[in-house]
Image (cartoon, rainbow, N blue to C red):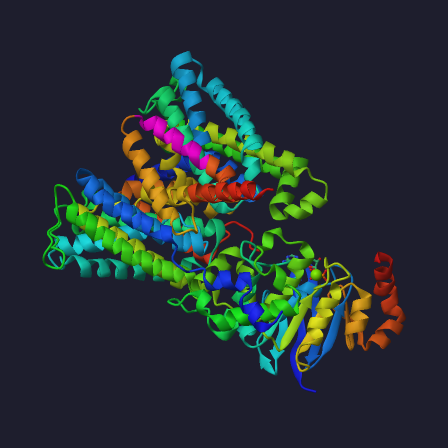
């Protein structure tokens, strides 16, 4: 093959165009905007979903791309939420957008420092460490009642209007919804850029085969710590948004429940796929919203069953099933 | 001749097992050196000591007279030591091209880039494609590793390593599992490398070893048993007794 | 002297709690060490055992000891089915898959128990011979705690002898240390896994019943105590019976003492120590380094 043949080789072209935007990628955003007009009474719930999407995206970066199996990601969500909460409650900082940046910075710093020591381990030890680290933060927040409000948390947070103009909407969350959607969009564009970059490619390499990454000369630990820090910062933004949108923080932001839920959401949608976070959060929260109050046991039973089935048969989650079906359909159509 | 890689009496123990015993070894510039020995002799362990996968219990590893005994794997790679694994270590969910891209991007320093797409690194893609072409892998460049025949995977393993443009190339049984009709691809690829590179190859295929090597070291139970030119080794009755006879029986 | 008595009673209480931790966790440690399986549903087997035992007593009027035996046997049998049908498919899967699968199981167990029995805590009424205090000469202490200590010690000794002295114990130890080597020696790993899993789950059931009196027994049990069981196993070292025993006692005593003297910061202390320990020795306090 000549040099130009090689450049036009399908594999080379596929790699060169891997990051291009697909038409359907506009869909989630159009739907989210449509919901704003179609369901004005459900925007509080919608805001919750969007925040969960962002949180799940942050986990996807660490778990889905770099393969860091963590059960303690709520540590960073909580760190962002408490940063905003404590600053606002004490009247130190109430401006929302810079508040997000502060939440990201604190969560990112905690992610960096903990990642520096935790990410030297792997497997079960890492799992335990992330779990214990989150427990440590949760208990500290519980104990430091003078600052964190302890078990009750902090409520009635005074948050300034966004860019000084748009008041947070207590009743219908209209402002919150658009604000969160905008932040989600920015963070998503950043994450998308990251996972398609050479850096993101090398994270995939670490996930697929760590030993080989060492053997091609990649500074594996440094890459993991950077990824973990970014992931923590994004989780911190999600937590900060949660505190601002609800005007309160409490221990639920830091608990095993939240960490397990976001993991389940990501896996349900499909991890390592960017859009799994959207699908998972939407499906999970809709089901939970409509089932868990009416039939709480049935919901839990069904959720458990779903997890078992995913672990045994459908590791790609909903998106993975979709891809599989599409491939089969194509194979069937292409048959002579 | 300058010495590229050298060990001074390195030893490695796994509990009571002495897998490497005071091995002093030199790999020179332009060397075509073979390391042979029965299964379990400690050949792979020795490569692991050279590349920093394992720390030795005692002794030193030197690269161009510089002590690298304590150096991490990745840093050694940056200094020009690259290896293939006896058992494939590939990015199994990625395409062949993406596998090689990983190594080339790392070598040219493109890998840390966060804000430009991987696909925009045309130079990395082009170089990876050319490498695949030279190993007759271009036609399967877009295949995912998982579905490939083992022999093909072996060649991808080699391609990744060559993508690092090493000065010292350590090949751990590169031809094992490759159909014999294709094993010449490996030797051709090594022949095409710059002559100054030092190559150390482990293999059980004596035809391949004797065709390739200008020097042979025989390792038995972790220690150097004999060393010399292929002729000397072939004529050494002790080597024949412990190893060569055995290997011919294996076929 | 008051101070001395206080310390001794704290120790006894802590050791008794530690024994329960040991009985529940030992199976988890061996299955994790042997199969490398992250079984977050282990506490679920303890809960189901606890429910069987308590319900057998409360509703069928069965004596305590007989109920314990029934709990052990039923859970061991049920877990065999689980192991053969489900767990065994995931022995080679990633940790993430194992985590998801076992969290899913926990949810299903919680929901099933809630549906079948209800969400409220099940009280365990001890038989009269276990109630009250016993005079040890230097101190008078709760009879049940002393019995727990005795039972735990006997179980420990039994397991230790079984591990050190029987063929099967030797096989398990060999398989924990080097699975491939064990397999090449002709040990039937599949059968070993099933037996160990069943036995470990049965022990968990026993622990669920024995500990119901002070750990409580409600559907949230497997999640509530998940982290503490994992900590015991991680501190003790995977697959080390004596390691789990010491770790259980240490954590039992530390937890008990902290709850008594420092009710606020106790959990923080345990989390903090576990983190430091695992960073220092990832293989646990009593695990073998590789
Ligand atoms: N990581 C390890 N832990 C324990 N023993 C090992 C390890 N790696 C290799 N060994 C043992 O060291 C000896 C040498 O192995 P190896 O270097 O793979 O031999 P070779 O490559 O010559 O066949 C063998 O007995 C093997 O079982
Ligand atoms: Mg070998």
> Could you say where residue A142 lies in the image, as x and y percent from the top left?
24, 46
Q: Name the quarter where the N terminus of chain C is drawn.
A: top left
Q: Number of numbered discs present? A: 0
Asked whether B233 falls inside the magenta stretch, the response is no
Can you give x and y, in whole percent of width and height, for residue A226 in the image?
39, 63
Q: Is residue A223 left or right of residue A57?
A: right
| Most distant residue in the bottom direction | B1
Q: Position of residue C276 (x, y in %)?
A: 40, 55
**Magenta extent:** A295-308
Q: Name the image quarter holding residue B33.
A: bottom right
Please name whichever residue, B36 or B42, is drawn nearer the observer in this view of the structure.
Answer: B36
Q: Is residue A191 left or right of residue A253?
A: right
Tell me the quadrant of the picture where the C terminus of chain C can be found.
bottom right
Q: Residue A316: x and y, percent?
A: 47, 44
Which residue appears farthest toward the top when viewing the image?
C60
- The overriding secondary structure of the stretch rendered in magenta is helix
């Amino acid at each position: 093959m000549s040099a130009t043949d090689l450049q036009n080789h399908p594999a080379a072209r596929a790699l060169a165009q891997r990051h291009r935007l697909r038409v359907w990628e506009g869909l989630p955003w159009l739907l989210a905007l449509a919901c704003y007009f179609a369901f004005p009474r459900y925007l509080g719930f919608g805001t919750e979903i969007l925040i969960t999407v962002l949180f799940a995206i942050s986990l996807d970066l660490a778990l889905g791309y770099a393969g860091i199996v963590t059960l303690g990601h709520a540590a960073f969500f909580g760190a962002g939420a408490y940063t905003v909460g404590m600053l606002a409650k004490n009247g130190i900082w109430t401006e929302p957008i810079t508040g997000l940046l502060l939440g990201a910075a604190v969560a990112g710093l905690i992610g960096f420092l903990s990642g520096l020591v935790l990410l030297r381990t792997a497997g079960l030890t890492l799992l335990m460490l992330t779990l214990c680290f989150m427990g440590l933060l949760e208990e500290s927040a519980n104990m430091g009642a003078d600052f964190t409000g302890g078990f009750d948390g902090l409520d009635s947070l005074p948050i300034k209007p966004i860019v000084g103009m748009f008041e947070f909407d207590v009743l219908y969350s209209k402002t919150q919804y658009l604000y969160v959607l905008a932040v989600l969009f920015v963070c998503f564009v950043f994450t998308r850029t990251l996972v398609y970059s050479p850096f993101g490619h090398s994270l995939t390499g670490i996930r697929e085969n760590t030993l080989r990454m060492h053997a091609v000369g990649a500074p594996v630990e440094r890459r993991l710590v950077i990824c973990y820090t970014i992931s923590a910062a994004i989780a911190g933004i999600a937590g900060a948004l949660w505190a601002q949108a609800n005007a309160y923080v409490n221990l639920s932001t830091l608990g095993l429940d939240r960490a397990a839920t976001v993991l389940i959401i990501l896996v349900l949608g499909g991890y390592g796929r960017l859009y799994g976070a959207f699908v998972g959060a939407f499906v999970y929260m809709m089901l939970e919203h409509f089932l868990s109050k009416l039939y709480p046991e049935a919901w839990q039973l069904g959720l458990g069953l779903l997890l078992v089935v995913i672990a045994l048969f459908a590791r790609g989650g909903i998106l993975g099933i979709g891809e599989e079906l599409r491939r089969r359909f194509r194979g069937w159509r292409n048959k002579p | 001749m300058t010495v590229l890689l050298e060990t001074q009496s390195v030893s490695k123990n796994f509990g009571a097992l002495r897998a490497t015993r005071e091995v002093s070894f030199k790999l020179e510039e332009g060397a075509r050196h073979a390391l042979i020995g029965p299964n379990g002799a400690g050949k792979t362990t020795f490569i692991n000591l050279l590349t920093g996968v394992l720390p030795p219990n005692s002794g030193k590893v030197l690269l161009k007279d510089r002590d690298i005994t304590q150096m991490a794997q990745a840093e050694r790679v940056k200094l020009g030591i690259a290896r293939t694994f006896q058992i494939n270590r590939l990015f199994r969910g990625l395409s062949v091209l993406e596998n090689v891209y990983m190594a080339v991007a790392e070598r040219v320093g493109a890998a840390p880039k966060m804000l430009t797409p991987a696909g925009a690194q045309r130079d990395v893609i082009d170089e990876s494609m050319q490498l695949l072409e030279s190993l007759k892998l271009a036609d399967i460049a877009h295949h995912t590793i998982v579905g490939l025949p083992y022999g093909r995977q072996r060649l991808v393993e080699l391609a990744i390593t060559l993508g690092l443009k090493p000065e010292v190339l350590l090949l751990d049984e590169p031809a094992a599992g490759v159909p014999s009709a294709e094993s010449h691809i490996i030797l051709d690829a090594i022949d095409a490398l710059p002559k100054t590179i030092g190559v150390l190859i482990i293999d059980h295929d004596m035809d391949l070893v004797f065709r390739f090597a200008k020097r042979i070291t025989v390792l038995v139970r972790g220690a150097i048993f004999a060393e010399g030119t292929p002729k000397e080794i072939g004529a050494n009755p002790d080597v024949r007794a412990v190893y060569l006879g055995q290997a011919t029986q294996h076929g | 002297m008051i101070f001395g008595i206080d310390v001794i009673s704290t120790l006894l209480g802590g050791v008794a709690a530690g024994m329960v931790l040991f009985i529940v966790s030992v199976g988890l440690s061996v299955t994790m060490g042997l199969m490398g399986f992250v079984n977050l549903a282990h506490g679920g087997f303890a809960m189901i055992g606890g429910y069987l035992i308590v319900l057998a007593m409360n509703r069928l009027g069965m004596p305590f000891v007989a109920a314990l035996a029934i709990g052990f046997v039923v859970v061991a049998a049920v877990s065999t089915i689980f192991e053969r049908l489900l767990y065994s498919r995931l022995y080679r899967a990633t940790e993430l898959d194992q985590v998801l699968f076992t969290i899913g199981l926990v949810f299903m167990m919680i929901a099933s128990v809630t549906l079948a029995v209800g969400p409220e805590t099940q009280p365990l009424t001890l038989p009269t011979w276990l109630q009250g205090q016993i005079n040890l000469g230097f101190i008078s202490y709760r009879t049940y705690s002393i019995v727990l200590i005795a039972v735990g010690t006997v179980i420990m000794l039994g397991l230790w002898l079984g591990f050190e002295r029987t063929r099967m114990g030797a096989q398990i130890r060999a398989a924990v240390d080097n699975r491939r080597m064990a397999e090449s020696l002709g040990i039937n790993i599949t059968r070993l896994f099933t037996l160990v899993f069943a036995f470990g789950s049965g022990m968990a059931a026993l622990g669920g019943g024995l500990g119901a009196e002070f750990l409580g027994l409600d559907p949230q049990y497997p999640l509530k105590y998940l982290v503490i069981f994992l900590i015991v196993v991680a501190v003790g070292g995977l697959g080390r019976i004596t390691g789990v025993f010491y770790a259980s006692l240490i954590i039992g005593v530390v937890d008990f003492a902290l709850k008594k003297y420092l009710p606020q910061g106790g959990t923080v202390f345990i989390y903090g120590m576990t983190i430091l320990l695992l960073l220092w020795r990832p293989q646990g306090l009593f695990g073998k380094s590789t």
